[in-house]
Amino acid sequence: MLSPTKRCKFTVSFERDPIFIAGRYCKFSRNLPQSAWGFDGEDGQNGGSVGERISDVFVKHFEANSSRFTPSGREDVDVRMLGTGRPFVVQLLNARRTAFLNDKNSTNKLQELAEEINSDKRKEVFVNSLSQVNSKQALILNVGLEEKRKIYSALCYSKIPLKDDFIEKLSLKCPVEILQKTAIRVLKRRPLLDRQRTIFWIKAQKLDSFHFLLRLQTQAGTYVKEFVHSDFGRTRPSLAELMDLELGTIDILRLDVLSVELEWPPTQTTKMALQN
């Protein structure tokens, strides 16, 4: 047997299994994007984003190499996320400090992390219901996205004085199926498609002759802004049509997400079912 003529060098490295932390977040700012570099080229004010403000705290305390922030859907930078918040999961890669997750005080520790995030002086991001999940449980976050329902609140403006019976007209016409072409504002990053979505219910409150507050429950993936102002007739029927008004009569001034209907974090029963 011949002796080797060259030396072989080996590098051995070890990485820990990723850690997954689930929770919900609220966003109270209309100037804060969800991700570090938002869609449509929108970057965070003062270098911040929802994902960074949550993940950075986890990376620090878990001593992780990096993180991946995954939300269930998204809101535009000028839209607030209210109510119980939007579901999310943070994946922590090669976390070196995890022992506290295995003791009886793990819930208290996660609550301490939530309090640190929520105590930020900017008061723009709030998290709740932090819980550890495994990789299989994390996957259900974005399963069946289009079957989920969301509730919105929109401040709307009418170019003509509102009649007193418009609220009754709206409520009687739901549920209603609408057809939406890809919104003009996102065409540069999404294909041109026709999307059928459902508006399950609408409630309206007249504020004055030209302004009203709209609450509606929609199928996930609905372009709510475009449903209100019609996107130059690319959403049919639009809100104005349901009110028997001409296209372009109604516009939207502000939009908030009030609810993302999803059992999240998973209950103990769901966790056990996914383990079997």
Image (tube, rainbow, N blue to C red):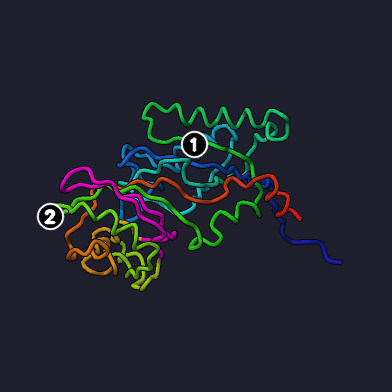
Distance from Cα at disc 2 to Cα at disc 1: 41 Å
In the image, 38: left or right of 213?
right
Against 177, residue 268 (above or below) is: above
Q: Quadrant of residue 60?
A: top right
Which residue appears at 12% of the width and 55% of the height?
160
Q: Which residue is mark 1?
A: 127
Extreme residue in the left direction: 160
Secondary structure, mark 2, is: loop
In the image, 214: left or right of 26?
left
Which residue appears at 64% of the width and 41% of the height?
132
Q: Residue 271 at what x, y percent from top left?
A: 69, 49
Kind of residue sitting beneath label 1: Val
Against 179, residue 67 (above or below) is: above
Q: Residues within 10 Å of mark 2 (few under 14, many from 20)?
A: few
Residues in magenta? Answer: 198-222
Q: Residue 68 at what x, y percent from top left?
A: 52, 48
Viewer-nearest residue: 174 or 130: 174
Q: Where is the C terminus found, in terms of image quarters?
A: bottom right
Viewer-nearest residue: 157 or 18: 157
Q: Is 84 a magenta residue?
A: no
In the image, 16: left or right of 213?
right
The numbered dot on residue 5 is none
Extreme residue in the right direction: 1
Foreground disc of the pair 2, 1? 2
Q: Residue 55 at what x, y percent from top left?
A: 50, 40
Secondary structure, mark 1, is: strand
Q: Please report whichever mark, 2 or 1, sits nearer to the chain's N-terminal start.
A: 1
Viewer-nearest residue: 1 or 207: 207
Q: Which residue is mark 2?
A: 160
